[in-house]
Image (tube, rainbow, N blue to C red):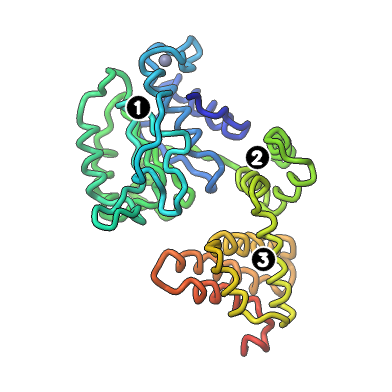
Amino acid sequence: MNLPALAPWQQRAYAQAAEALAAGHFGHATLITGPAMIGKRLLAEHLAQRVLCLTPCADGAPCGTCKACSLFAARAQMEAAELRPDGSLAHPWGHSAHPDLLLLGYENHPKTGKPRAEIVIDQIRALTAAMGLTAQLGGAQVVIVDPADAVNWSAWNAILKTLEEPQPGRYLWLLASSPAQLPATIRSRCQRLELRLPPRAEALAWLRARGHSAALAEEALDAARGHPGLADAWAAGDGLALRREVVEAVAALRRGRAVPSDIAQRWVADGRAEERLRHLAEYALRAATEQPQAPAVRGLSLCFEAANRARGLLRTTVRADLAVLEALLPWLPARAAGG
Ligand SMILES: [Zn+2]
């Protein structure tokens, strides 16, 4: 199958990388950054086809017909190992059959059979062993680590070794939405390719082309604070309805007309607490940017932090409704919170 076409903001980053490749300035290791769902993986895959193609066009674009391009396009979904911890597909467009495209992501724990929450050192050892071999098609070799945010500390040490011994035609691409969390020793050895939020008009045009009505596109883009990938997901599913529910609950809490533990119970009942907390965090951030002078700003940043902390707690053994409760309490009027 062919990959989906790049959106305009992804195309700009792609063109920047293509130019660097043509000029011989594209480094061995690249940190591909940008918020979740902005298209880092799609960008990386398009770039992978470009560098793996054995007979590229005059402008460097992949030919689409050589052996490398054919293998690159041959895709399949594998076992449960190909799922992320949240249940989404680790390879949204299938796992490529190209032997020199190595994809490193969440692996299943051998004992529980469930995806691990991090990328561990054994995976890196297996990877570096594979990288030591000659590229099977005699061309380039590409390693995509997605998400690099999930690589654990000891595994980084093993990656560091490959960064210190760059080889021509070998590429290591680290995809991260929170690059600041990566070790400085890693970041300093990588070039940076950043996907930024596009201008509003461009995002709206893209959302319209995805089949959303103008009104829905605007509402979703506002709710997602200009992030078209997130807006698309919300507009396509019931994300906006979920967001309205969150906003109404917060309004009731602020007026002292709702019991936080009741809301927490409701929010976890259908297994979508994480999504609601994400809306809650976005809502706090949006409210804070819209009222920068308001006395409530400090409160709103606390609300934002509490929502994100609660999202982290959901991945632990803490009871889900108690985690959600932590995120709701900062929204209570001061006297009700006992302050
Ligand atoms: Zn080709």
Of labels 2 and 1, earlier in sequence is: 1
Q: Which residue is mark 3?
A: 246
What residue do we see at 37% from left, 21% from top? 71
SS at mark 3 in the image: helix
- The three-letter amino acid code for the residue at tag 1 is Ala
**174 w.r.t. 299: above or below:** above
CA gap between label 3 and label 2 equals 26 Å
Ligand 1 within 8 Å of disc 3? The answer is: no
Q: Which residue ends up furthest to the right in the rendered image?
A: 215
Position of residue 4 in the picture relative to residue 206 (left or right): left
Q: Position of residue 215 (x, y in %)?
A: 79, 46
Position of residue 242 in the picture relative to residue 158 (left or right): right
How would you rate the neighbour count of disc 3 (Cα within 10 Å): few for under 14, some for 14-19, many for 20 or more?
A: many
What residue do we see at 31% from left, 19% from top? 139
Of labels 1 and 3, earlier in sequence is: 1
Decide which of 336, 24 is in the foreground and name it.
Answer: 336
Q: Which residue is mark 1?
A: 97
Q: Which residue is mark 2?
A: 198
CA gap between label 1 and label 3 equals 43 Å
SS at mark 2 in the image: loop
CA gap between label 2 and label 1 equals 32 Å
- The three-letter amino acid code for the residue at tag 3 is Val
Q: Position of residue 339 (x, y in %)?
A: 62, 88
**175 w.r.t. 332: above or below:** above
How would you rate the neighbour count of disc 2 (Cα within 10 Å): few for under 14, some for 14-19, many for 20 or more?
A: some
Position of residue 102 in the picture relative to residue 258 (left or right): left
How would you rate the neighbour count of disc 1 (Cα within 10 Å): few for under 14, some for 14-19, many for 20 or more?
A: some
Q: Which mark's residue is nearer the viewer, 3 or 2?
A: 3
- The three-letter amino acid code for the residue at tag 2 is Pro
Give residue 280's mark.
none
